[in-house]
Image (cartoon, rainbow, N blue to C red):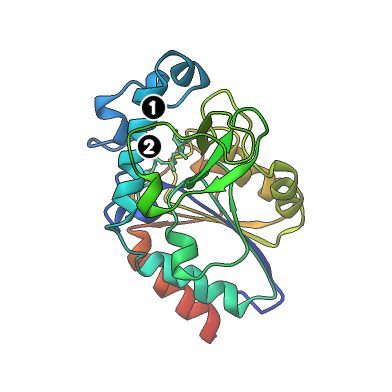
Amino acid sequence: MITKRTRVVVLTGAGISAESGIRTFRGSDGLWENHRIEDVATPEGWRINPQLVWSFYQQRRKKLLHVEPNSGHLALVELERFLDSFLLVTQNVDNLHERAGSKNLIHMHGELEKLRCEECHAVEVMMEEKHLGEEILTCQQCGGRLRPHIVWFNEIPMQMQEIMEALTHCDLFIAIGTSGHVYPASGFLHKAQMHGAQTIVINLEPPENISFSDEFYQGKAGDVLPMLVRRWTQE
Ligand code: OAD
């Protein structure tokens, strides 16, 4: 079904990192359990209580120091190496795809490891030793306040034009570990299918947008992906 020339776009969500020990958003032990989304994931939340928001993301950053990529992340690296044209779009703000070895990667909801100046918009990469404290940091270039480089609700996801272009031209679109609740990512399946791509969904349970999938594999990404990638690359 797949050859080296098949143009593939993959979308991942929290489910692919679940087996590494990072909690999903909408599970029963969901990350938002102790916080209202408006308090920690909106521009208003940051304006009203920046210290709370800062601490929330610092906790998530510290968690990254204790987790490792799993077999799902690694299978996607193998798939990328096999193909001539491959784009991985992730909604996840963790760094597990790049640590596994993925190269052509878009973090559409931002990255935990980065901060952005509210004044000059410069982006800084955080360093473990000096950036994991509770004090909100300032920009090295202009002294402005740094905010998490995260796309909050009511903000526009990153690199949308590039993503839309890839969805329009791909032959195969695969959505993995995402509940299909959050727009615009939830619309990618339909968009790719409308433009003639084959669509595959891999998830623990049928997601909201399941009706736009041609094939659905129910199970853990860490089990299903290695099996599929082995089949595709060895056929
Ligand atoms: P969700 O928590 O909404 O959905 C995760 C999905 O992964 C669920 O459908 C689970 O059934 C599935 N799942 C769990 N473990 C799995 C596993 N081992 N293998 C395969 N599937 C598994 O997470 P997202 O869809 O990623 O946005 O959430 C989308 C966005 O909502 C996030 O990026 C975040 C949040 O608000 C922002 O922060 C802007």
Q: For this view, does 127 lie left or right of residue 192?
A: left
Q: Which residue is more in the foreground, 37 or 187?
A: 37
Q: Are marks 1 and 2 in contact (CB under 8 Å)?
A: yes
Q: Which residue is more in the foreground, 143 or 205?
A: 143
Which of the numbered marks, if any, corresponds to residue 18?
none
Identify the residue at horizontal 41%, vertical 73% (top origin): 226
Identify the residue at horizontal 44%, vertical 66% (top origin): 99
Quadrant position of ligand 1: top left
Residue 116 on image: x %, y % = 57, 37
Name the residue beneath numbered marker 1. Answer: 53
Q: Secondary structure at mark 2?
A: helix
Does residue 177 sit above or below 152 in this rendering?
below
Residue 24 on image: x %, y % = 33, 43
Does residue 89 sit above or below 98 in this rendering?
above
Q: For this view, does 226 lie left or right of residue 68?
A: right
Q: For this view, does 102 lie left or right of residue 165?
A: left
Task: Mark 2 and ligand 1: say if the CB distance to the nearest ligand atom is below 8 Å.
Answer: no
Q: Secondary structure at mark 1?
A: helix
Amino acid type of the residue that numbered disc 1 sits on in the rendered structure: Val
Quarter occupied by the C terminus: bottom right
Identify the residue at horizontal 46%, vertical 80% (top origin): 230
Name the residue beneath numbered marker 2. Answer: 57
Q: For this view, does 24 lie left or right of residue 140?
A: left
Residue 211 on image: x %, y % = 53, 42
Is residue 61 shown to the viewer in this render? yes
Identify the residue at horizontal 22%, vertical 37% (top origin): 29
